[in-house]
Image (tube, rainbow, N blue to C red):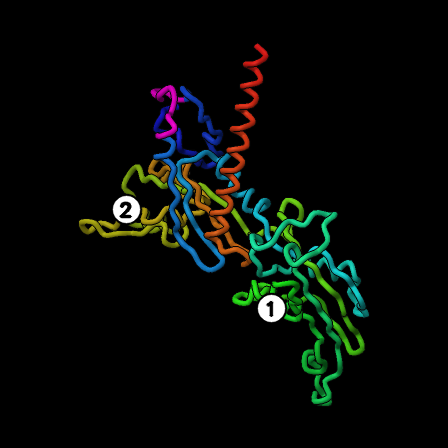
Amino acid sequence: MALEDRNRVVILEDRVENISGAEFPLSFDAQQPSRSLEELKNSLDIKIVHITATEIEFDLIGVDASIANALRRIMLAEIPTMAIETVYMINNTGIVQDEILAHRLGLVPIMADPQDFNWKLPEDPPTDQNTIVFKMKVECMKNQSAAADETDPNKMYINSSVFSSQLDWDPKGDQATRFADKPIKPIHDDILITKLRPGQLIDCEIHCQKGVGKDHAKYSPVATASYRLLPEIQILEDITGDDAELFRNCFPPGVVEVVNEGGVRKAKVVNARKDTVSREVLRHKEFEGKVRLTRVRDHFIFNVESTGAISPETLVSRALDVLMEKCDISKAALAKAIKGDMSDE
């Protein structure tokens, strides 16, 4: 395979070619024997495309898929957050069993920066430095002001639905002072935990601690973290007239537009990034030999949605810090192994 195709995954009608990476020297014709560290640094780039309070879309360019996937997995499983770990059930007369109720509570994301807290080991007692305490006491009662013919439980009863907003933070030690500007609470107030009917009661104390997603999914700071390769559409021959309209309709809106050049309608790729690579265009004989679909192997489009505990830009930054720490550990272990081999000789 030629060097110019090294960074392209080729999409054909019935298969995908050049899917395996080969980032070692002399893998391709005319390739240089090796790449210097400086060349790798110059080829690496990160571009933020879109960012909101909970979502970020960015491009990671110039790295192998192993690096991109490592970054994705770190965001999913190795960035610590605070989550509910222990529920002390004092009284529960609702229909949902204690274990199920505790599990539902555990999945409620908590607004608290994990860097403000220490890790809690199994033998450590709970303190204001490693534990957040919530209390919840909710009792369902009849609404005396409801109409006699009312059928809506939300109007017939008080506290018929228990939401995450009913978790009351109970500051310990100096937490009230430390977090005066940003009180600790559930990220979303409208998460339904359970339902009650008159006479039913839930009374519990809830402890949160620091953890990571590889121990339990409730600690994962992301709702989704995914990447895809940048699509590339090459028009090899002009596609004009009615064929141009058909060609445009083979792609999602915004990918291809029909422009007028010299009185001739012609198909033009305007934003290949939006393409889902459905290969619909390859089903039409009119375009055989006129279009080539590829994906850029070292250009990754990341889409990350935070649960809200950590801002998306901070999430990516912390994931990169963890990745660099892993590299340092690997370098130290490799240097120690090499030193050991040399001493054996």
Give the mark nearer the N terminus: 2 vs 1: 1
Read off the residue under disc 2.
Answer: 240
What residue is drawn where x is 63% and y is 52%? 210
What residue is drawn where x is 38% and y is 37%? 44
| Circle 1 crowding by C-alpha within 10 Å: few under 14, some 14–19, many from 20 | few
- Where on the picture, by quarter, is residue 291? top left
Badge 1 marks a residue whose secondary structure is loop
Which quadrant: the C terminus?
A: top right
Considering depth in this image, is 20 or 122 the residue closer to the camera? 122
Residue numbers of the magenta segment: 28-38
Residue 143 falls inside the magenta stretch: no
Badge 2 marks a residue whose secondary structure is loop
What residue is drawn where x is 79% and y is 69%? 94
- Measuring from the top left, give residue 335's x and y in whole percent: 52, 23
- Measuring from the top left, give residue 323's x and y in whole percent: 51, 39
Relative to 236, residue 94 above or below: below
What residue is drawn where x is 49% and y is 38%? 324
Of all residues, the one furthest to the top in this rendering is 345
Can residue 113 be seen at all in this image of the molecule? Answer: yes
Please tell me whether the stretch drawn in magenta is mainly helix, strand or loop.
loop
Can residue 293 be seen at all in this image of the molecule? Answer: no
Considering depth in this image, is 19 or 186 the residue closer to the camera? 186
Of all residues, the one furthest to the front in this rendering is 174
Relative to 123, residue 131 above or below: below
- Measuring from the top left, give residue 255's x and y in whole percent: 36, 50
Residue 34 falls inside the magenta stretch: yes
The residue under label 1 is which amino acid type?
A: Asp
Marks 2,1: beta carbons within 8 A: no
Read off the residue under disc 1.
Answer: 189
